[in-house]
Amino acid sequence: MGMRILFVGTVKFSNYMLETLIDNGAEVVGVITGSDNGLNSDYVDLAPVCEENEIAILLADRINEPNVLEWVRKCTPEVIFCMGWSRLIGSELLQLPPLGVIGYHPAELPHNRGRHPLIWALVLGLKRTASTFFIMDEGADSGDIIDQQPITIAEDDDASTLYAKMVEVAQGQINKILPLLTQGNYLRVPQNPAIAN
């Protein structure tokens, strides 16, 4: 692909997305991941994928620290993909890559921002949710949307079946987004804060 990507994540979904980027021939120049601190029930160690593909990896529970920013600068990414990271990213890191930081949220943003959106979708009895890629800003899931695909929630869906649907849809979106990013040919749709929750 020729575009230098740095990847951030700590969960099972992160592992799927990292493998999808690699399978698409993306140039992943580094991975930042966290330790298993009990915050995420689906924590996954990304080191095996990185070792297999000779990708530099940094373990960093505090992503906005000066040593992490320095490591990112040395990787010289053009874009950062943040997929499965539960903490806010500071402005300095958000501004480092020329194309910004692309985040992911399994909800129909601007609805259902924040933690556990799949669980909330089920608890609220929603008939549909969405798989959303967006340009991260300093807020929680509040940046401009670059791709959003609806996901139908069936009556017999539970958290695991909805998770599987989300992964499949998101993998398709990565395939679509990568060439658009490379060409600089993607739309940014601002979220409407008046309908956010």
Image (tube, rainbow, N blue to C red):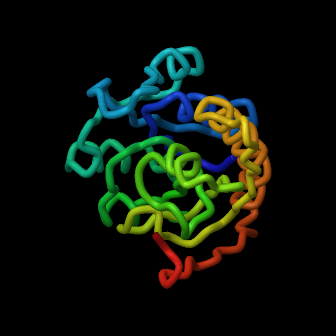
Q: Is residue 1 visible?
A: no
In the displayed structure, 92 sits above or below 151; it is below
In the picture, which quadrant includes the N terminus? top right
Residue 180 location, quadrant: bottom right
61 or 67, which lies in front? 61
Q: Position of residue 17 (x, y in %)?
A: 62, 36
Residue 94 position by quadrant: bottom left
Give the residue at x 56% y 72%.
144
Question: In front: 89, or 99?
Answer: 89
Farthest bottom residue in view: 194
Rendered residue at 26%/27% (across/down): 37
Q: Position of residue 67 (x, y in %)?
A: 22, 43
Say if residue 94 shows up in the picture: yes
Could you tell whether 113 is left or right of 170 in the image? left
The percent position of residue 34, horizontal first and vertical second, equals 33, 32
Left or right relative to 131: residue 105 = left
Q: Which residue is outermost to the left?
A: 66
Tell me what residue is drawn at x 49 percent, y 58 percent.
Answer: 101
Q: Position of residue 125 (x, y in %)?
A: 61, 52
Report the label total. Answer: 0
Q: Which residue is located at x 32 percent, y 66 percent?
A: 91
